[in-house]
Amino acid sequence: MDTMEDVPTTLGRYRVLSHLGVGEVGRLLLGADDADRHVVLTLVSPELVTAPGFRERFRHEIRRAALAPTWLAAPVLDADPDADPAWLATAYVAGQTLSAYVADHGPMSGAGVEELAVRLAAGLAALHGAGLSHGDLGPSHVVLAEDGPRLTGLGMTRVASGAPDAGPPGDMGWFGALVVFAAMGRSPAAAADTGSLTGALRDVAQACMAADPVTRPTAAQVRDRLRGSSSTTTVVPTSAQQSAQQQSAQQQSAQQQSAQQPGSSPAATAPFAAVMPGMRPAVEPGPTHRRPGRRPPTAAVVAAAVLGAGIALAVVLLVAGGGGTAGDLAGGDTAGGLPAGAGPSPTSQVAPTSDPASGAELIDATTDTRFGGDGARFATPSGNIACAMTADVRCDVGERTWDLPAAPADCPLAFGTGAVLSGAGSGALSCVGDTVADPDLTVLGYGEAVEYEGVVCVSRETGLRCENRETGHGFFVSRAAYELF
């Protein structure tokens, strides 16, 4: 179905703008929030929602996907799996899928294949390290975005079909075939079918495609092997590849000349290695506002990110509600979050593994008084999260769609309106009779962090995370969910 028939005009806080297509779990729509930030809306098909066990699978895969690193996976903005119809909203990622790129430009150059392999191996290592696996890592589930390749459709094959999880070894089998596809322009017929690949890439691809999953290398092993041998890895062009590359170069030259003429159309997507120099991690976007003359992205631009050969969703899914363990979840301050049971319990011991303020501008509240004296009081840019850092740290979330456990018997006040961190203990849900919210609070901008007495609170579009540097304990809160650790 390619019409807007029977499509709601709004889904949650999003306006529905146009129809994009049909994915594996439902219809794909272009939407916009109240700041005119464009999103991909997925309307889950009634057939799937009513299928036995679907909602349980859906929630389970969403809990797993919530741990995915945002530089690897497209961020989630909101979701309501219990609505009728069920839906979710995700940021769109502009760019071609790997399958579309190869169809348009032919096989990648050796440098492009190697950069793709190193980036994806690093991403899979992070994914597998969080206890996750993709499950269907085909070329239509890799989007060549401007800031690096992104994985899409995480866990959606399992959601739609109920297929068993093949785990990291299954992903590594897909990875080997993906590298060969990028180099040859077709899928390999067998493990030995690596075409023009030579050196470390050939060895890695063959090892990953071994028939026995137990013998396949881990993503971390592949990442380290490729990083240590980049100077010796090559792809020897075949005559077909040379022809495709020459044709692509001629087209790009013509497009560049045309682009210099007044009124000409923009050039097509640049070669992979040129599009993503250095494979840098994605920068978390700040809030966007409509500028005069700004037009919504066309369906073709958005569809490049969310549609491919059989692609289900160009998103990592996130359920509305619950607690557990999540990484940075994009869109959390304005919508994102984490469902219940997605990780260690609030009483688990968590050792600090990295600087909680990594990548953020750090403000020391003991010397910088912009957030008030004797601690820090602030709100996030959305105004939905307000925090007070004193001897304890407390953050209240105004609008929440959390699935909460039963209130403890010793809590006669409002339970779970936010989270608190006291001393060296773990993060906990709050039990309060007031609020720290105030319209005059100073805003802690996205990408900024404030530290007071060893606790760091970081504001991102993904939500607000506070962590004790010494113990590693803390919490993460967003509109849709919370994390305690």
Image (cartoon, rainbow, N blue to C red):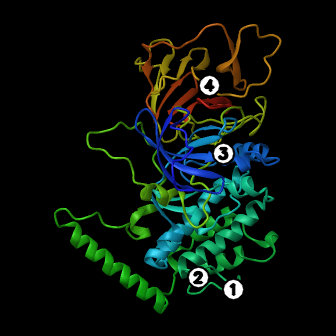
Indicate the secondary structure of the residue bearing disc 4.
Answer: loop
Tell me which label, 1 or 3, sits earlier in the chain. Answer: 3
Front: mark 3 or 4: 4
Image location of residue 465, percent across then percent down: 58, 31
Q: What count of labels does the image hold?
A: 4
Near mark 2 (Cα within 10 A), the count class, few <14, some 14-19 or many ≥20, is some
Badge 4 amino acid: Arg
Tell me which label, 3 or 2, sits earlier in the chain. Answer: 3
Rendered position, 478 above or below 1 = above
Name the residue located 55 percent from the left edge and 39 percent from the top edge. 8
Tell me which label, 3 or 4, sits earlier in the chain. Answer: 3
Tell me which label, 1 or 4, sits earlier in the chain. Answer: 1
Question: Which numbered marker is on residue 36?
Answer: none
Residue underneath mark 4: 400
Question: Which numbered marker is on residue 199?
Answer: 2
Tell me which label, 2 or 4, sits earlier in the chain. Answer: 2
Rendered position, 7 above or below 122 = above
Q: Are marks 1 and 3 in contact (CB under 8 Å)?
A: no
Question: Which numbered marker is on residue 67?
Answer: 3
Name the residue located 56 percent from the left edge and 63 percent from the top edge. 142
Question: Which numbered marker is on residue 192?
Answer: 1
Image location of residue 204, percent across then percent down: 65, 75
Indicate the secondary structure of the residue bearing disc 3.
Answer: loop
Where is residue 413, by image quadrant? top right
Near mark 1 (Cα within 10 A), the count class, few <14, some 14-19 or many ≥20, is some
Cα gap from disc 3 to disc 4, whole angstroms: 20 Å
Cα gap from disc 1 to disc 3, whole angstroms: 34 Å
Image location of residue 438, percent across then percent down: 48, 12
In the rendered image, the quadrant that contains the C terminus is: top right
Badge 1 amino acid: Ala
